[in-house]
Amino acid sequence: MYSNEEISESGILYSLWKYLTTFDGQGTLNQSKSHRCGPSFQWSLDWPQRTLFHLYTGLKTLMDEEERYTSSGGVIYETISHSPKCQVDFSKQHESTSKPVEATNVVHNLKEIFATFKLDANVFPAPVVHATRDLCARYLGGIWTSLDDEDLELKAITGGMSNLLFLVRFVASKHPIGNEPTVVLLRIHCNLDTTHLLNESVIFTLLSERSLGPKLYGVFPGGRLEQFIPSRCLKCGELSIPSLAKKIGALIARVHALDVPTIKQPMLVEIAKKWLSKIGETNPNMKHELKGRMVALEKNSKYPQYVNIDVLTAELNLMEKCLAKSKSPVVFCHNDLQEGNILLRGDCEIGEDGALHGEYTDQPLVIIDYEYANHNYRAFDFANHMIEHILDYSNPQPPFYFINKERYPSVEQQKELFIAYFEQLQYIENDGQLPAHLVEEISVGREKFVEILRLETQRFLATSNLFWSIWSFMQSGNSPIEFDYVSYGLDRLILFYQSKSDLIELLDE
């Protein structure tokens, strides 16, 4: 289990752990104790009981799993049973008559198991199938506890750059015995960090409760089980379709207006510094010639000949100085609004004229994968989303991405997105749910607000490029996902240098 020192050093872990002393696990709060838990959390009795319960069970599961992992020397030994930890209501557990699941070993480092599977393979390795069955039995209950390995149907879902994704269902001859899901999405994290995983689990749960993301079925060291929404990811070229751009703008507004209990300071630079530190630990002599794979170096421009940790550190330090001058408001941001993280519901279609057709045309899109979500400068979310218009990850051949700068949104296309964002903020304000600092932001009127946001976005393009360049160099040494991270990191760094002058303008303000 975590020591007091470890708990106190981790803001979100400390806060959640302290909260366990005020929450009895049965959906009630002990009001004799304080509900202000640590520097990064403010708990509220107004939160839905289901939200509080999911946060409680999610943390308890993670900490229990970590304790078992530590005490067993790296391998978790546990008999699969109908554990109450992942049930929504302890008092209404299903009394299953299905056969008990035999004791099994669940390896803590799921990343190693699932790394044995190749996306282009037709057959799943036995360890992958077995681990999947174990996880589903433990966290889903019901019929899942009586399934054999051959009763599972698995399908790899491509497109994830930080996670391995699998669609899991049982064969048609099997039937649910309760309200357990019949199909789920299994997400395996490629970077294991307990504090980060806790942070993401809290965020995921809150967004699920507010209809901004899939439901959470189970969370464990190394990944989670979540609701599968029949849908498809948007394609890169679809981001600029006016009908979709307006929906995306409205969704971003809903995310930015959320009051999420995480540290209310921009984490951008701090996270990038941690990534640089990891590079220093795993590849201290990293050195790459600055050559673009998909982006050409501009003539008569100043670029370093080689990229190493010192170069990246110097640019990050400059970026930090520039951001200190930024007036972009700090809000809760997704931070990775690329096409692969925006789903179009399966019953919606895009017509040849760009119009939406189907049952859910009011809310046809779902934003997913809040792995990098935290409080950040508002402009980062928009700058990152704009750049994603030119980054296409559908290339089946190395380097597994395309870059087409001609796809960058025009001023008019940007304004469509910003206007939809503004109007959604107005709607949220009318409902009395908009944070005070955003109420002040929109009080300047639509035209001025849109122009301010457009300028903010332009100046933050460089921050997105440098941030993901550092991330890519860090990923290059430890990711099982087939992707040319080094080339991607170099291309994003070249894009950083091409937009750096706009960032430096912040120093003159």
Image: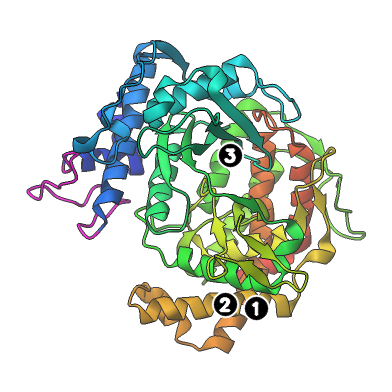
Q: In the image, is 350 to the left or to the right of 440?
A: right
As helix, strand or loop, the secondary structure at mark 3 comes to helix
Give residue 66's position: percent from left, percent from top.
37, 24
Query: Magenta part of the protein: which range?
Result: 22-46
C-alpha gap between disc 1 and disc 3: 35 Å
Q: In the image, is 213 to the left or to the right of 24?
A: right
Nearer to me, 365 or 397: 365
Give residue 77's position: percent from left, percent from top.
38, 12
Residue 155 colored magenta?
Answer: no
Residue visible at 83% across and 44% down?
290
In the rendered image, which residue does mark 2 sit on?
A: 420
Q: Residues within 10 Å of mark 3 (few under 14, many from 20)?
A: some
Give residue 41's position: percent from left, percent from top.
30, 52
Above/below status of 428 relative to 187: below
Residue visible at 71% across and 60% down?
387
Q: Amino acid at mark 2?
A: Ala
Give residue 437's position: percent from left, percent from top.
39, 74
In the rendered image, which residue does mark 1 sit on?
A: 416
As helix, strand or loop, the secondary structure at mark 1 comes to helix
C-alpha gap between disc 2 and disc 1: 6 Å
Above/below status of 16 relative to 346: above
Nearer to me, 173 or 112: 173
Q: Amino acid at mark 3?
A: Trp
Mark 2 and mark 1 residues within 8 Å of each other at the beta carbon: yes
C-alpha gap between disc 2 and disc 3: 34 Å
In the rendered image, which residue does mark 3 sit on?
A: 275
Residue positioned most to the right: 299
